Image (spheres, helix red, strand yellow):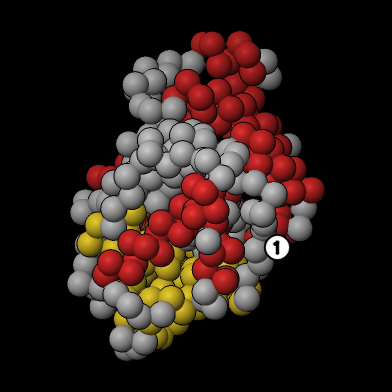
Amino acid sequence: MVLALLLASGARAADAPVMRAQQVSPSSWYVEGLSALGSPANQNFISNAGFVVTPAGVVVIDALGSPALSERLVAEIRKVTPKPITHVIVTHYHADHIYGLQTFKALGARIIAHSAAKEYLNSEAAHLRLEASRQELAPWVNEATRLVEADEWIDGSKTLNLGGMEFRLINVGPSHTPEDLVIYLPQEKVLFAGDLVFRSRIPYVGKADSRHWIAALKTLLTFDAQIIVPGHGPLSREARKDMQLTHDYLVYLRESMGKAAANLEPFDEAYQNTDWSQFESLPLFRVANRMNAYNTYLLLEQEGK
């Protein structure tokens, strides 16, 4: 396995972050990544992943940010159940959620994702991102790490029934990405929200459709979810309250950068003149906020045309 080979070659895991599966409901668990940038020290463990144990097998939700991490996730699953891992549902195709897919593919799991991811997956940007990760995250992401397509591409929402457990895969993109899926378990009132929800850190906005993202957050509140597992940060038992950070941040970005774009104010000037005090104490603010603001500024320039 990848992790064993890396350790045999001298790669160190002694300082790697602890991964521990936390039980969410009678059938569901998740592992929580760090509020940090991906690095060799953390093996790119910066996002969450979940798994659900059914009588017919295990369904994994997202595959983490390196093959070594996905192998560690498999080990956590094995502490809970010996049942086969039958499916992996991908909430979206960002690197920190998909570089571990090859581990599950090798185990025979069926990978399900939204077809809107195909454009990115087959793009030069995705391959350049992987090449950069091989340099920046070596040895945990390396030449053996590859992009893995879904076995089943869905075009909208879908219900999966496995061993008497119902999984509702709901298409909420384009929001954080064009292909966003959230997964709701109505029998246990658990919602795996992917990167529509960030907790305890600044959201990564990138080239998101922030207007639709805000609307999608309202859609999530229509589910009778008692627990929400976000794409980043600790699980939530107070849906409205714990979505508020993501919602308020996106709204503030759109309001502040929208006003600047409408007034033809240069971005650097607009950024400097904006009061960021309500968000600047959050992890990754200094790393991500300026880029988020710039991308939102460009988006609102286009929306205003």
Please state which of residues 187 and 278 is positioned toward the viewer in this rendering: 187
Residue 299: give x, y in percent of width and height: 65, 37
Give the tally of numbered discs.
Answer: 1
Q: Is residue 229 above or below residue 304?
A: below
Residue at left offset 61%, top offset 11%: 269
Residue 300 appears in the figure = no
Residue 138: give x, y in percent of width and height: 60, 39
Tell me which amino acid carries mark 1: Lys
Please state which of residues 198 and 33 is positioned toward the viewer in this rendering: 33
Residue at left offset 44%, top offset 28%: 284
- Residue 93 found in image quarter: bottom right
Q: In the picture provided, is 183 more to the left or to the right than 236?
A: right
Residue 119 appears in the figure = yes
**Which class describes the residues within 10 Å of circle 1: few (<14), some (14-19), or many (20+)?**
some
- Give the position of the C terminus as an image quadrant: top right
Residue 220: give x, y in percent of width and height: 37, 59
Residue 71: give x, y in percent of width and height: 46, 59
Residue at left offset 25%, top offset 45%: 241
| SS under mark 1 | helix
Q: In the picture provided, is 120 more to the left or to the right than 12?
A: right
Residue at left offset 44%, top offset 25%: 285
Please state which of residues 121 and 157 is positioned toward the viewer in this rendering: 121
- Residue 135 found in image quarter: top right
Q: Which residue is mark 1?
A: 118
